[in-house]
Amino acid sequence: MFTTARHLEFVHFRDNRFLKVLSSLYLLVWLLLAYKPLYPSGWLLENLLVFAFVGLLLVTYRRFPLSDLSYLLIALFLGLHSVGAHYTYSNVPFGFWLRDHFHLARNPFDRIVHCSFGLLLAYPARELFMRVAKTRGFWNYYLPLDMVLALSAVYEIIEAMTAHAAAPELGDAFLGTQGDIWDAQKDMGMAACGAVAAMLITYCVRRWVSPVQITQSGGNS
């Protein structure tokens, strides 16, 4: 059974076929993209937070497992981040194709990933608030947006501090501002847009699914 935030059932990892397949696919992608990155030192910097985050997911799985949907969204975001870490965000080939095809001023891949941060991680944040803080109604949709904005700001601060401490050429590659002095603010704005979109989609799906559940249960919900 594929689980969501509203329908969560703990399954031990050895019996969770979906999670085992998902973990294997992500590990394969990560290993392939860890091979000969464009800037090895930059790749390591980009992955420090990944190591900490994945480690947290592993140690909390038994006591606080997330839904299959949340793990899927997290894996998708981490996969995108792995691509950016391999090439550095401002040098991802797909971003250059987008730039040339749509006549953009810069490689937009970093903007895509920042938007994906909100789009893909707002739902796991919503699940966290629902289960820990027992949020309901409006707060189920507002607090994930708040959390995405807060984490985006923290990341930009860490990114700036790391780039300042690193060698100039590595710092520039790590930041990937591409000459835009408002890069950090635009990145946070894209994350916010992604989170708003995720919560709107979640709200619409909930509104669509709930009447079906009520009908199936004979009007009791």
Image (cartoon, helix red, strand yellow):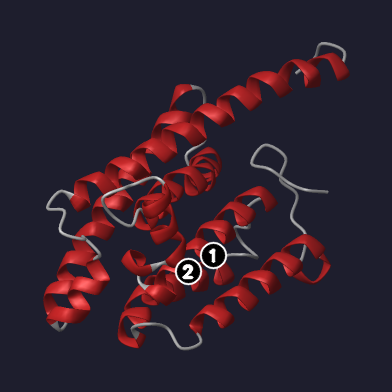
Given residues 16 and 24, the one toward you in this image is 24
Q: Secondary structure at mark 2?
A: helix
Disc 2 residue crowd, few under 14, some 14–19, many 20+, Cα 10 Å:
many
Question: Horizontal placement of 159 versus 25: left or right?
Answer: left
The reply to whether residue 15 is visible in this rendering is yes
Q: Is residue 90 above or below residue 219?
A: below
Q: Are marks 1 and 2 in contact (CB under 8 Å)?
A: yes
Q: Secondary structure at mark 1?
A: helix
Residue tagged 2: 83
Answer with the quarter of the image where residue 195 lies: top left
Residue tagged 1: 79
**Rendered location of residue 182, percent (x, y):** 15, 48
**Rendered location of residue 120, percent (x, y):** 51, 48
Q: What label sits on residue 29 in the rendered view?
A: none
Disc 1 residue crowd, few under 14, some 14–19, many 20+, Cα 10 Å:
some
Q: Residue at x 66, y 48 (%)?
A: 69
At label 1, the amino acid type is: Gly
Question: Horizontal placement of 113 versus 185: left or right?
Answer: right
Q: Residue at x 25, y 56 (%)?
A: 154
Question: Horizontal placement of 203 versus 112: left or right?
Answer: right
Given residues 162 and 100, the one toward you in this image is 100
Q: Quadrant of the C terminus?
A: top right
Q: Is residue 191 above or below residue 200?
A: below
The reply to whether residue 144 is visible in this rendering is no
**Rendered location of residue 149, percent (x, y):** 31, 43
- Label 1, label 2: how far apart the Cα atoms are: 7 Å
